[in-house]
């Protein structure tokens, strides 16, 4: 039994309302917390609460690399 035909093209997921919001706010200064809240409000993206993100993760990685040097 074949679940997927790998020869078929893959359809892209498009979220028109989120795309429109992003284009409307492109290159406009915005509070990062407000921007994150509005993007999350669309319901397409979920936060990872069990992982470090962004600068915190980068700093942790760099500290680990320094200890190995």
Image (tube, grey):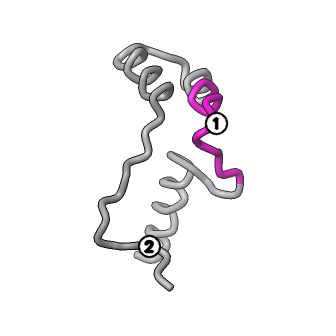
> How busy is the neighbourhood of tag 1: few (under 14 within 10 Å), some, or many (20 plus)?
few
- Is 50 rendered above or below residue 20? below
In this view of the protein, which residue sits in the foreground, 25 or 54?
Answer: 25
Do tag 2 and tag 1 residues touch (Cβ < 8 Å)? Answer: no
Pointer 2 residue: 4
Give me the residue at 49% from left, 76% from top: 3
Q: Position of residue 14 (x, y in %)?
A: 43, 39
- Is 55 rendered above or below residue 27? below
Q: Nearer the viewer, mark 2 or mark 1?
A: 2
Q: Main secondary structure of the magenta part?
A: loop
> How busy is the neighbourhood of tag 2: few (under 14 within 10 Å), some, or many (20 plus)?
few
Pointer 1 residue: 43
Q: Residue furthest front?
A: 1
Determine the image quadrant of residue 4: bottom left
Q: CA–CA distance between discs 2 and 1?
A: 27 Å
Asked which secondary structure carries label 2, the reply is loop
In this view of the protein, which residue sits in the foreground, 36 or 16?
Answer: 16
In this view of the protein, which residue sits in the foreground, 29 or 3?
Answer: 3
In this view of the protein, which residue sits in the foreground, 68 or 61?
Answer: 61
- The magenta segment: 37-49
Q: Position of residue 45 (x, y in %)?
A: 59, 42
Give me the residue at 50% from left, 25% from top: 17
Image side of residue 23 versus residue 32, left or right = left
């Amino acid at each position: 039994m074949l679940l997927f035909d790998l020869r078929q093209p893959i359809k892209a997921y498009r979220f028109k309302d989120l795309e429109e919001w992003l284009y409307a706010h492109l290159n406009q200064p915005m509070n990062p917390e407000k921007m994150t809240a509005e993007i999350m409000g669309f319901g397409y993206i979920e936060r990872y609460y069990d992982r470090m993100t962004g600068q915190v993760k980068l700093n942790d990685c760099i500290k680990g690399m320094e200890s190995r040097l």
